[in-house]
Amino acid sequence: MKILETERLILRTWREADIEPYLAINQDPKVFEWGLGIPMARERVETFIADMNKGFATDRFSAFAVEEKSSGNLIGYVGLCRVPWESHFTPAIEIGWRLASSSWGKGYATEAARAVLQYGFEVLKLDEVVSFTSPLNVRSQRVMEKIGMTRDMKGDFNHPRLAADHRLLQHGLYRIRRP
């Protein structure tokens, strides 16, 4: 089901046909360089897709499947989710994205994230949305800045799902409030 539409993208709920392309995205070493674990196996992708659709049915938000209008191809996800662990800034709703490396550098993450933020603030009436990434992930930081998020310099934290010696352990916290 289509949820949002931008000039070049459709953000929608997930379909069974998305399993293979999303699996391929999650096997790409360029994409997974910024992942928080091991590449997703097929079973994990299937669970992720089912969980996102259940989340939308319950909350009216999820990590939405992103489809490129011109090709009809699934290029990844952009969306909202509840931060699933405790931290100094939780409970919180996070905006996040994961796109195929072939879609990088085209402004898709920014375009979709702007639409998702608008949906979050205008439809869901969220007061605040957060995002976070490693200081090494400059691409994601740029998207956060382009969509109007600001770094909470007192909010940095060690990601609780990463080992103490993981190169991505430290994360910077970004925030945006409803206008």
Image (cartoon, helix red, strand yellow):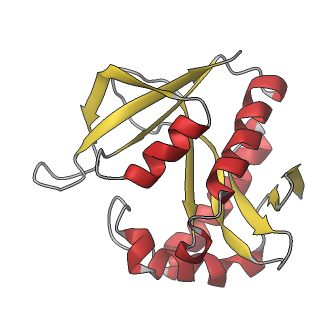
Give 52 or 27, whichever is nearer the viewer: 27
Residue 82 showing in the rendered view:
no
Vertical side of 23 occupied by 167: above or below: above
Q: Quadrant of the C terminus?
A: top right
Residue at position x 76%, y 20% in the image: 125
Residue at position x 79%, y 58% in the image: 13
Vertical side of 85 occupied by 108: above or below: below
Residue at position x 30%, y 39% in the image: 171
**Is 91 displayed left or right of 80 in the figure?**
left
Q: Residue furthest left?
A: 165
**Is 140 displayed left or right of 155 in the figure?**
right
Vertical side of 78 occupied by 22: above or below: below
Instruction: Give percent across and percent down for residue 117.
Output: 70, 34
Q: Quadrant of the N terminus?
A: bottom right
**Is 174 displayed left or right of 53 in the figure?**
left
Give 126 or 117, whichever is nearer the viewer: 117
**Is 34 displayed left or right of 76 in the figure?**
left
Residue at position x 76%, y 78% in the image: 73
Instruction: Give percent across and percent down for residue 34.
Output: 37, 61
Vertical side of 178 occupied by 174: above or below: below
Residue 59 image-quadrant placement:
top right
Residue 153 showing in the rendered view:
yes
Instruction: Give percent across and percent down for residue 99.
Output: 58, 65
Instruction: Give percent across and percent down for residue 139.
Output: 45, 54
